[in-house]
């Protein structure tokens, strides 16, 4: 019997609201089916199921706001034996009154001085930075000690209360709060380093123009897809930039899922992923880019679209921005930025001319890589764009 739980739809998400069920008890579901819609501070997300089987019971009700990981439903997995006791029966037994177990006495702790709160040094430092009174925080660590996540939750609650109490028009939107929280965490925790390079795009744009002559108008490939393909291929050569910083160590990802920053017409942005980008053709990347942008702006994203990006790519060239220095989205370890392609004086084999030039930037986590590896990535990116026919 599998539990369908509240998914984590981003590093900054701690709770979600069940908006609606698309199934009822007795329905048969297969892996990938959209069985629920969950509301976050950024958007309502269609949530997929990862088992094939039969829905046995819906635990949560629409409108309930629950923490990430909370059980929402029970699903009887196809091919598995039905347990003698269903999870709901076990839960009922656990809820029934029972004699308290006899426990061994806890080891004696050094008494906490009067007036001093039992908290970890990191929690104390963070509380001071965020203006949180530790005396009002409930600790969840050993013997009630206050830990870092306790302070972060207290700070989030404080911000929510302040926003709710603000006069109309002065409060910060839920999406802005979520973005601010993620970026504040990034700036606080990640030691960024930044690199930039300029890339001659004359050959790449000329090749793309010739290539598009063989495609119908609706199937033509835009430069944005070519840049995504080049990023994916460059990550194959420098894999340390593709992954996550978790438990004080780099965890590389064997898959390359490019998170694409998409601005919303109502304000704010989302970062859905194009999966296995290194294994897709330019035409496939272009189709997925169109699809992901359309569904993002229509509010029809799925949970699988936004939960597993291994690196983020942002492109502000359409807004006239020439150079982009981004902030890494934790727990990722890098972000690639592209600006507008502009005409600049450029020397080729000693001859000065005017060429279309693109500025590419890299924001990377110094705990995971150093400037040398970052420079190798940008060099690989530039080399790939000089040979677009090989992409």
Image: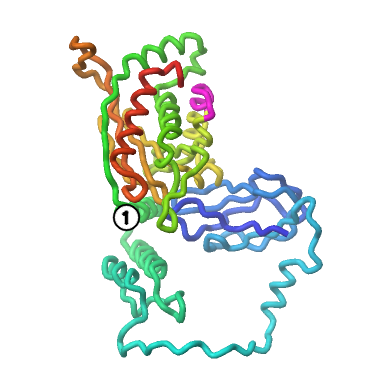
Residue 70 image-quadrant placement:
bottom right
Vertical side of 36 occupied by 225: above or below: above
Q: Where is residue 381 in the image (x, y as percent from the top left)?
A: 36, 28
Give whichever of 203, 239 is nearer the camera: 239
Q: In this view, does 36 lie to the left or right of 77?
A: left
Q: What is the x, y in percent for residue 265?
A: 40, 38
Residue at image point 46% right, 49% down: 251
State the image coordinates of residue 333 (x, y, percent, origin top left). Answer: 38, 46
Residue 60: give x, y in percent of width and height: 63, 62
How many numbered circles does the render carry? 1
Range of residues picked out in magenta: 279-287
Q: Is residue 281 magenta?
A: yes
Is residue 155 shown above or below 192? below
Q: Eyeballing the image, is 303 above or below 81?
A: above
- Residue at 29 percent across and 24 percent down: it is 199
Q: Which residue is drawn at 46% across and 9% down?
A: 213
Picture colour scheme: rainbow
Under circle 1, the secondary element is helix
Left or right: where 190 falls relative to 352: right
Q: Magenta: predominant secondary structure element?
A: helix
Identified at 33% across, 65% down, the residue is: 162
User: On the image, numbered disc 1 is attached to which residue?
Assistant: 184
Quadrant position of residue 354: top left
* Residue neighbourhood size for the residue with mark 1, other residues' Cα within 10 Å, grouped as few (<14), some (14–19), many (≥20): few
Image-quadrant location for residue 100: bottom right
Q: In which quarter of the image is the N terminus?
A: bottom right
Check if residue 246 falls in the magenta segment.
Answer: no
């Amino acid at each position: 019997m599998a539990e369908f739980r509240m998914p984590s739809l981003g590093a900054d998400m701690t709770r979600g609201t069940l908006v609606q069920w698309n199934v009822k008890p007795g329905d048969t579901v297969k892996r990938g089916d959209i069985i629920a819609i969950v509301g976050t501070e950024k958007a309502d997300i269609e949530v997929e199921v990862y088992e094939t089987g039969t829905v046995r019971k819906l635990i949560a009700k629409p409108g309930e706001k629950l923490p990430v990981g909370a059980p929402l439903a029970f699903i009887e997995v196809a091919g598995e034996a039905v347990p003698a006791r269903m999870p709901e029966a076990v839960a009922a037994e656990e809820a029934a009154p029972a004699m308290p177990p006899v426990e061994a006495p806890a080891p004696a702790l050094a008494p906490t001085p009067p007036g001093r709160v039992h908290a970890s040094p990191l929690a104390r430092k963070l509380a001071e930075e965020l203006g949180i009174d530790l005396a009002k925080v409930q600790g969840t660590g050993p013997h009630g000690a206050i830990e870092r996540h306790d302070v972060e939750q207290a700070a989030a609650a404080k911000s929510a209360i302040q926003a709710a109490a603000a006069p109309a028009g002065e409060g910060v939107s839920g999406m802005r709060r979520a973005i601010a929280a993620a970026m504040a965490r990034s700036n606080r925790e990640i030691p960024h380093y930044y690199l930039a390079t300029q890339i001659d795009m004359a050959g790449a744009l000329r090749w793309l123009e010739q290539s598009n002559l063989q495609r119908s108008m609706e199937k033509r490939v835009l430069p944005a897809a070519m840049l995504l393909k080049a990023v994916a291929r460059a990550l194959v050569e420098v894999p340390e930039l593709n992954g996550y910083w978790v438990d004080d160590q780099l965890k590389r990802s064997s898959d390359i899922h490019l998170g694409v920053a998409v601005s919303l017409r109502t304000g704010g942005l989302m970062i859905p992923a194009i999966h296995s980008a290194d294994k897709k053709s330019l035409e496939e990347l272009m189709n997925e880019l169109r699809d992901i942008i359309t569904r993002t702006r229509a509010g029809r994203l799925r949970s699988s679209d936004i939960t597993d990006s291994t690196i983020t790519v942002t492109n502000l060239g359409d807004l006239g921005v020439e150079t982009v220095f981004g902030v890494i989205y934790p727990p990722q370890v890098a972000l690639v930025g592209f600006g507008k392609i502009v005409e600049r004086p450029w020397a080729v084999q000693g001859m000065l001319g005017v060429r279309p030039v693109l500025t590419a930037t890299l924001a990377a986590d110094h705990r995971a890589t150093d400037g040398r590896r970052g420079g190798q990535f940008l060099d690989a990116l530039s080399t790939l764009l000089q040979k677009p026919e090989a992409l």
